[in-house]
Image (cartoon, grey):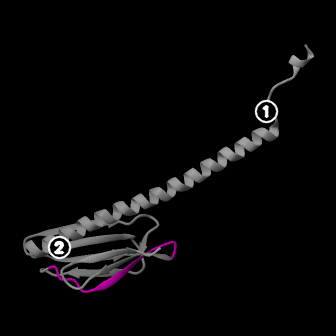
Amino acid sequence: MAMWNKKRAFTLVETMVVLVIFSSSLLIGLFNIKKSHSYQNEAYFFKQFDESWQYCKYLSNFKRCYTTIKFHKAENNISFDSNGRYFRWKKVLRLPADLKPFYDYSVIMDIDGYTKPQTIYFTQNNKNKYKLSVQLGWGIYELTKLS
């Protein structure tokens, strides 16, 4: 009968080992979720940017509007302003919190969709992350991820 009186329980060391393993797996999961969320925000922003850019090309070609696209570093946004003879359209896109243009830039799209070639860099944590190359004429751009 003395054998049944032994207490069956976890020791403090075993409990601490289980807690350390569990907490480290939670931390790794949270880090991956944060990274994935940041990636999703950037993808959503660039999709909105592309839709606005294409709409400006449409306005230039069919409504004969001049469009000014301004990249604001301090306000951390991009503004689209299309002016035509009988038509005006404005839109402001907020950049994701950790993504900023390297400088203030302006891109002008003429009434035929022509744009001057330029290169615009976006930084994240003081490192270049994206390069937006506005190509010669016809309002075409190319977005390249650098890192």
Left or right placement of residue 29 versus residue 1 in this view = left
Which quadrant holds residue 110? bottom left
Q: Is residue 124 magenta?
A: yes
Task: Give 32 or 78, whichever is nearer the viewer.
Answer: 32
At which x and y percent is residue 84?
11, 75
Q: Which residue is mark 2?
A: 57
Question: Observer-nearest residue: 57 or 93?
Answer: 57
Residue pictured at 38% horizontal, 66% vertical: 95
Q: Which residue is mark 1?
A: 10
Relative to the observer, which residue lies in front, 13 or 78?
13
- The residue furthest right is 2
Mark 2 touches mark 1? (CB < 8 Å): no
Check disc 2 and report its element: helix, strand or loop.
helix
Residue bounds of the magenta highlight: 113-126
123 sits to left or right of 140: right
Q: Residue shown at 51%/56% (left/top)?
A: 34
User: In the image, 60: left or right of 17?
Assistant: left
User: Is residue 143 inside the magenta stretch?
Assistant: no
Say which residue appears at 23% left-offset and 81% top-offset. Answer: 108
